[in-house]
Amino acid sequence: MRGLSKEIWEKHIENSLITEDMYRAENDMEHEDAFISDLKFGTAGIRGKIGLGPNRLNRYTVERVALGLAQSMNENGQDVVVIGYDIRHLSRAFSETIAAVLVKNGVKVYLSEGYITTPELSFFTRSHEADFGIMITASHNPPEYNGIKVYGADGAQITDVPADELSSKINAIDDFFNIASVDFDEALADGLVEHIDYEHYDDYQQKVRNLSGEIPRSDLQVVFTSLHGTALPLTQYLLLELGFNNLTLVDNECEADSDFSNVTSANPEDTDAFTGARALGKEKNADLLIATDPDADRIGIEVLHDGEYVHLNGNQLGAILLYNRLKETEFEKTPVVVKSVVTSDLSKKIAEKFGAEVVEVLTGFKYIGQVALALEADEKREFAFGYEESYGYLISDFVRDKDAIQIVPTIVKLASKLKNTDSTLVDYLNDIYEEFGHRMEKMISHKFEGIEGKEKISEIMDQFRRNTPTEIEGRKVICVEDFKNRERRLSSGEIETVELPKADVIKIHFEDGWIALRPSGTEPKIKLYVSLDSNHINEEVKIINDMIFGV
């Protein structure tokens, strides 16, 4: 294929958006990986390292995605796209590159004038009644990464079928270097590209304010870090408007910074992401630490409890938010809670108390968005809450992706109420455990880089499928769900069909919980999820992990 020729790519470096210095700084292994294949468009769009070559993000690979989308839109009579971008390297340049190709192919483009959050892009796609939305972001990946997320007209990331159709269009484009585009500045001057009107920003913010309502006065002290991302100044502004001003920023982590210079991790799932917030929190005696990831779709918290900061995992924060949502909201219809198959079953017990229904979907917030869309026309049921254990939550579906901006005022309001009763969010969680049972969860991620890493991950999954255990640490296996084969095998020998799309996930059920194994869809990782009624979860997880991965 022409696109795989290293020599041809090197001739085009001047216009690639990649500098000669960037390219020459890479080692031989990185160069080999950059030219070994094309960057693949999957169900989460494209995410990869920035650099020269067909397996990297640069002007030419980005134009290829844009042309594939334009061709698909032209065939289907679609003509409006909204584009947003975050603070990463080349995010703005990539957004303008995509816009220039789309306009050349007759598509009207609305573009954010500055960086925005991912949930805002989801909202703007719907508020503009656009056919597609595009967000330039790589979420919490390291700074050398960027990505292109594609959203449908419903504001959710496109699902498998449209993603496959778009992928086929992109893959059919062999000539990376002669994709036609317009001059971006001229398109902007001619009105073919328009900046998103501030009215749409105001509408989103008003919906967040309405969702939370005024925050009660208390002496709650909060420390916040955006991890160099997009959540500020938006979250601070919203909290002030809702009556909360006891917010202290981790200043050197709250500047938009493509290099993430002052954080060891930009992922709020990682306790290391709270290093700066924890230090400032101890200095200020803060009750609550909040961190959002760079595109502000994920959120994590730590709570001062008995003199120590307690990091709540994604399931624990989800249980708090779910209980609070169902307890404090009067629904007109039966509330529906949507969760992924690797998210805690504690949600089912909470939902049952409040007469809510639980729907399980595959991992990926696009599937939660699908359920929200289907519920729009349902006369008896309505969306109430959606979440994944990976720190992604959605309270109200005016956004169709996980939305940390919704969560910040909601969790601050609850913490402020609890502060006035001399209790904490940990107390609130313990009350939930007391009522519904002490279900504990833990996730371990193993990273395997490169081609050999992909083969290793496939080998682990194949081995686990072929030799699925019948007992683990004294727990008898009562059911095995293989989402790739769409089979549910019961211990009785009976086989049922899993009524979900295919996915490379295996889930093993016991009487008191389950474990699951799943390769990441966006990173070179394989994840082990453990959810058990246990008082020794760390010890049990270590034994299970060692058994599966041969540690």
Image (cartoon, rainbow, N blue to C red):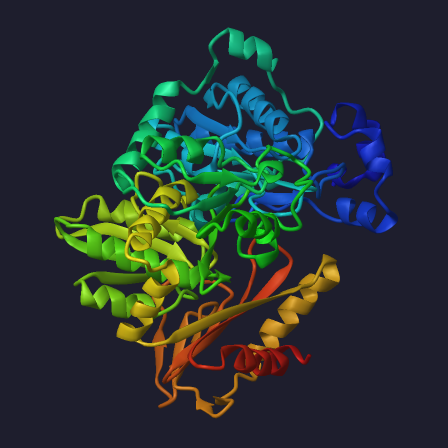
Instruction: Name the spot of residue 139 as percent of width and height, x first.
Output: 55, 44
The image quarter containing residue 48 is top right
The image quarter containing residue 129 is top left
In-image side of 481 versus 50 (left or right): left
Q: Quadrant of the C terminus?
A: bottom right
Number of on-image labels: 0
* Up/down of 427 relative to 332, above or below: below
In-image side of 427 versus 182 (left or right): left
In-image side of 45 versus 491 (left or right): right
* Up/down of 46 relative to 346, above or below: above
Instruction: Name the spot of residue 515 as percent of width and height, x first.
Output: 47, 76
The image quarter containing residue 104 is top right
Q: Residue at x 63, y 37 (%)?
A: 252
Q: Quadrant of the N terminus?
A: top right
Instruction: Name the spot of residue 482 as percent of width and height, x first.
Output: 45, 73
In-image side of 193 versus 384 (left or right): right
* Up/down of 323 relative to 443, above or below: above
The answer to whether residue 112 shows anywhere in this view is yes
